[in-house]
Image (cartoon, rainbow, N blue to C red):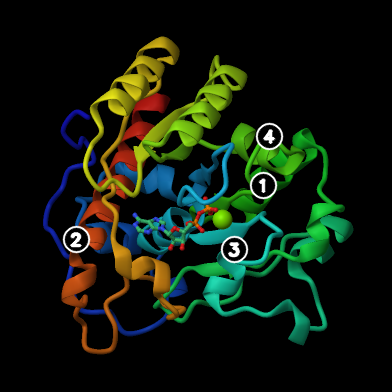
Amino acid sequence: MPDSTAGVATRNVSGKRRAGGAEAQQPGIALERLGVASSPALMELLPRLIVTVAAWKGGVGKTELAKELAFLLGGVLVDLDWDEGGATRAWGYRHETRATAPLLDALEAGRVPRPLSGGGVRADLIPSHPDFAIHQPPADQMASTLEKWSQSLGRPLVVDTHPGGVSSTMGAVAAAHVIVVPVNLETRALKATESMAKELQGGYPLLFVINRVEAAPEAELRQLEKLSDTFDIPVGPVVSSHTFLKRRKLTMAVCAPGRSGEIPARAAGFVEEMHEVARSVLDLALKAQQ
Ligand SMILES: Nc1ncnc2c1ncn2[C@@H]1O[C@H](COP(=O)(O)OP(=O)(O)O)[C@@H](O)[C@H]1O
Ligand SMILES: [Mg+2]
């Protein structure tokens, strides 16, 4: 991956949390969280940025990456996955206890949902609902809906998706400036990545992010490089395997410094890697406009 063109000013991995909610500081909050210097192009891009995290296979890290990217970008996490164990649950939202279903209600009424506040320690959220499985709009309607929400909210949107080319995922892919594709260097995950690259070839700004790397297996790496060359898909920064993630119960973003203002030592490596991923997303989105 080439050097960041987003202009890295300072690393702020363990920076203090600023007072006040995330909502008050748009779009500068992304620059502050990422330690990226402001530029007119970024200030113009951030309020309308749409990032979709998608993969044709489950369990590869879509949700983990989406919720952290949404936090780092000071954005709204739009959860379009209806499965249990998705971003909505991880955020701490339980649809069973709610009288409304923000995603379904907004789609039905054709209005813009108001994101739930993450209180500055996790991304603001448009939560999903199990019934979205049978109430997904067609792809073109999903895409135009996300574009409308983006325009109205004026903040980065990070969309987490259901695995595979279902209509809501295809819509989120079509609306995105960058599509982050988490890739596991495993046989079946690579097969799924290949079908996705084949299906989406031509015009979609995909970015491979190798996730959960323990040791880089040569054969699988070569396979991914071939896919990257054939379909002209850049390979972004690598995210290592971090065992603590699998058993983590906290609802705050891993990348959010807690009340102490510190990132716990065990999370520092992941946080650093996520910062790199977020900067690459901004780089690619900026390049795509040139
Ligand atoms: N880099 C990583 N290291 C270790 N575990 C990870 C990593 N990324 C994701 N995981 C874990 O793998 C599981 C599946 O990830 P998830 O983000 O839910 O995948 P998906 O959304 O693609 O189904 C989760 O338990 C998650 O915490
Ligand atoms: Mg998921």
Instruction: Tell me, for residue 269, which label it has, or none.
Output: 2
The kind of residue tagged 2 is Gly
Select label 2 or label 1 by which is in front: 2
Local crowd size for mark 3, using a 10 Å CA cut-off: few (<14), some (14–19), many (≥20): many
Could you tell me how many numbered marks the image carries?
A: 4
When asked about the image quadrant of residue 15, the answer is: bottom left
- Cα separation, mark 4 vs mark 1, equals 17 Å
Mark 1 — residue? Answer: 146
Quick one: label 2 or label 1, which is nearer the N terminus?
Answer: 1
Q: Is residue 281 above or below residue 244?
A: above
- Give the percent coordinates (x, y) of residue 54: 55, 41
Quick one: label 4 or label 2, which is nearer the N terminus?
Answer: 4
> Is disc 3's CB within 8 Å of ligand 2?
yes
Mark 4 — residue? Answer: 165
- Cα separation, mark 2 vs mark 1, equals 32 Å
Regarding residue 41, the answer to whether it shows in the image is: no
Residue at 15% x, 47% y is: 8
Tell me the quarter of the image containing the N terminus: top left
> Is disc 2's CB within 8 Å of ligand 1?
no
Tell me the quarter of the image containing the C terminus: top left
Instruction: Tell me, for residue 86, which label it has, or none.
Output: 3
